[in-house]
Image (tube, rainbow, N blue to C red):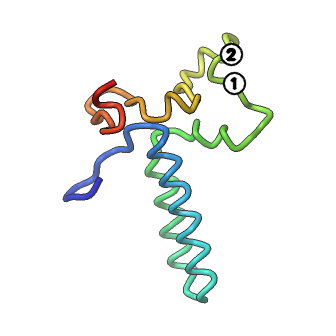
Amino acid sequence: MSGPGFVQLSCVAEELLLRFWLEATEATLDLYDLLTPGTAQALGSLRENVYADLDHEWLYDPALYGIDQDPAAAHLGIAPMGVDDWFASFGGDRPVHPYTAGA
């Protein structure tokens, strides 16, 4: 989404896309010798503050595969992490992703 103001990420897919974008941005800046300490700090600050939680990071750890479906981990309140759930809205006042609007 683009426009004025800040809109919270509304689904796992957006979290994954932002993670990819941040990594690609950092790699590109580094490649062209543009990754200054200030820029790295700004990207780190964005990374630390933009996500409501870091559940999506668990997708990168094979040891945690299926933790979102484990009854023993239910108390953690993990969003569903299956591919079919990546575009499901986190709820609240967050918008429904256009990909799932008709579903």
Q: Position of residue 9 (x, y in %)?
A: 38, 44
Element marked by disc 2: loop
The residue lying furthest to the right in this view is 63
Residue at x-position 51% and y-position 62%? 21
Q: Position of residue 82 (x, y in %)?
A: 58, 28
Q: Position of residue 39 (x, y in %)?
A: 51, 77
- Name the kind of residue labelled 2 in the image: Asp
Residue at x-position 62% and y-position 81%? 30
Q: Is residue 90 left or right of residue 83?
A: left
User: Could you classify mark 2 by the number of other residues whose Cα lies within 10 Å: few (under 14), some (14-19), or many (20 or more)?
Assistant: few
Q: Is residue 60 above or below residue 66?
A: below
| Viewer-nearest residue: 82 or 78 | 82
Q: Quadrant of residue 31?
A: bottom right
Residue at x-position 51% and y-position 66%? 43
- Name the kind of residue labelled 1 in the image: Gly
Q: Position of residue 85 (x, y in %)?
A: 50, 28
Determine contact: label 1, label 2, CB under 8 Å.
yes
Element marked by disc 1: loop
Q: Which residue is mark 2?
A: 70
The residue lying furthest to the front in this view is 102
User: Could you classify mark 1 by the number of other residues whose Cα lies within 10 Å: few (under 14), some (14-19), or many (20 or more)?
Assistant: few
Q: Is residue 31 above or below residue 15?
A: below
| Viewer-nearest residue: 92 or 95 | 95
Locate the C terminus by quadrant: top left
Q: Which residue is mark 1?
A: 66
Q: Quadrant of residue 40?
A: bottom right
Q: CA distance from mark 1 to mark 2?
A: 7 Å
The residue lying furthest to the bottom in this view is 33
